Image (tube, rainbow, N blue to C red):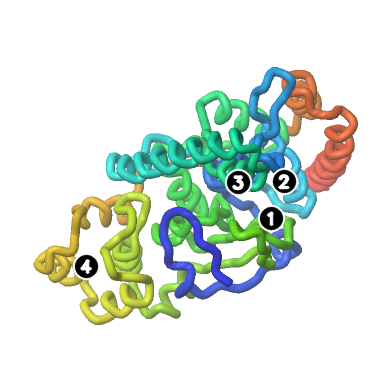
Amino acid sequence: MQLSFMGLQIGDIVPRKSLEFSDLKGKVVAVDAFNAIYQFLSSIRQPDGTPLMDNEKRVTSHLSGLFYRNIALLSEGMKLIYVFDGESPELKNRMKEERRERKAEARDKYEAARDEEDIDSMGKYGKQIGTLDSEKIEESKELLEAMGVAVVQAPGEGEMQAAQLVKDGEAYAVASQDYDALVVGADRLIQNLTLARKRRLGNGTYVFISPELIEYKKTLQSLQLDTDQLISLAILVGSDFNPKGVHGIGPKKALSLVKEKKFPAVIFKELEEQGKLNFNWKDVFEIFKKPDVKKEKIVFPKMNIEKIKEILVERHDFSLERVEKQLEKLNVIKGKNQQQTLF
């Protein structure tokens, strides 16, 4: 079953293969930071939709997710880079406004459910109202670096910068639930990079999940497309820069249209003549063709166990016992890294 995510909706036609965590041992993975943190803010909540909070009512769901999830991944032998978004293209404003409207609507429904003491509905709508502000972003960076995770600040879209790290040989793959990194040419995209083996859907049912690898060259070969045609396909089905794409065109129809017309100018000229475009396709094409990225040489920070305790236990009232139990795993990783350096 193909799950639906924000951003590009091309999952149904993209070839993929299952991965074992052992396949990623010793590999460097670039994580789309905002994508991951929003997932934690959404999923790490009480049954009534309330996020984890410290004694001062400050949200800590993101810190919990970053700490426990990344220790698990580091324990599998991976090295991690978290790439944070910079300035978004103006074309993304429409999508941001739509998200704000959806959150406002979800907040109204959450408050109505709270008034009626409807716990199930509170849980449902609570997942949709998490916000990521500058304070959460900076503290996330601080915790990650203390854990030995490299942090990169992108000039533009984080996922596109992560793709550049892969293209430059600084990372093996991008980890994200979206597909933008693939469209801009990342050699490898990993989805479902989590140790959890099932994911809860909105209707209360669960689906089995495992890490999956999507490769750029194999995608082009399988779909029989070139680079510009893959970008055209992405624009047709809709991206963060042209939400909903072209009305009436899904992934399979888009693929057929791209193969038939072949050239972006021909594909979109006909759609323009038919009055089906409500956006400037050339502007969107340019974002994918020439993403706002930079060259970055990755240096991994040293783990700082005391800093982790200060952030989680002293600042945010995490259980010292639980944190120390996890830190034992980090000490093992730290010891292995030192051993490798010695030899």
Instruction: First in sequence, mark 4 or 3: give its number.
Output: 3
**Where in the figure is residue 243, as x and y percent of width and height?**
33, 53
Label 1 to label 2: alpha-carbon separation: 7 Å
Residue 181 x/y as whole percent = 45, 56
> Residue 264 — which label?
4
Q: Tell me, yes or no, whether the two marked residues, 1 and 2, touch with CB atoms within 8 Å.
A: yes
User: Which label sits in the foreground, 2 or 4?
Assistant: 2
Three-letter residue code for mark 2: Arg
Question: Judging from the image, what secondary structure is the residue with disc 2 in?
Answer: helix
Q: Nearer the viewer, residue 13 or 26?
A: 13
Name the disc covering residue 69, or none: 2
Determine whether, in the image, residue 259 is placed left or right of residue 114. Answer: left
Q: Please determine whether, in this image, residue 324 is positioned above or below residue 22.
A: above
Report the side of 308 relative to 92 (left or right).
right
Tag nearer the camera, 4 or 1:
1
Question: Could you say which quadrant of the image residue 151 lies in?
Answer: top right
Q: As shown in the figure, which amino acid type bears the numbered disc 1?
A: Thr
Q: Is residue 38 visible?
A: yes
Disc 4 marks which amino acid? Answer: Pro
Crowd tier of the residue under label 4, counting other residues whose Cα lies within 10 Å: few below 14, some 14–19, many 20 or above: some
Camera-side residue of 177 and 3:
3
Question: Gap between marks 4 and 3, in whole Å?
Answer: 45 Å
Label 2 neighbour load within 10 Å: few <14, some 14-19, many 20+: some
Which of marks 1 and 4 precedes in the sequence? Answer: 1
Residue under numbered circle 1: 194
Going by the image, does 218 lie left or right of 66?
Answer: left
Distance Cα–Cα, label 3 vs label 2: 27 Å
Report whether 58 appears left or right of 253.
right
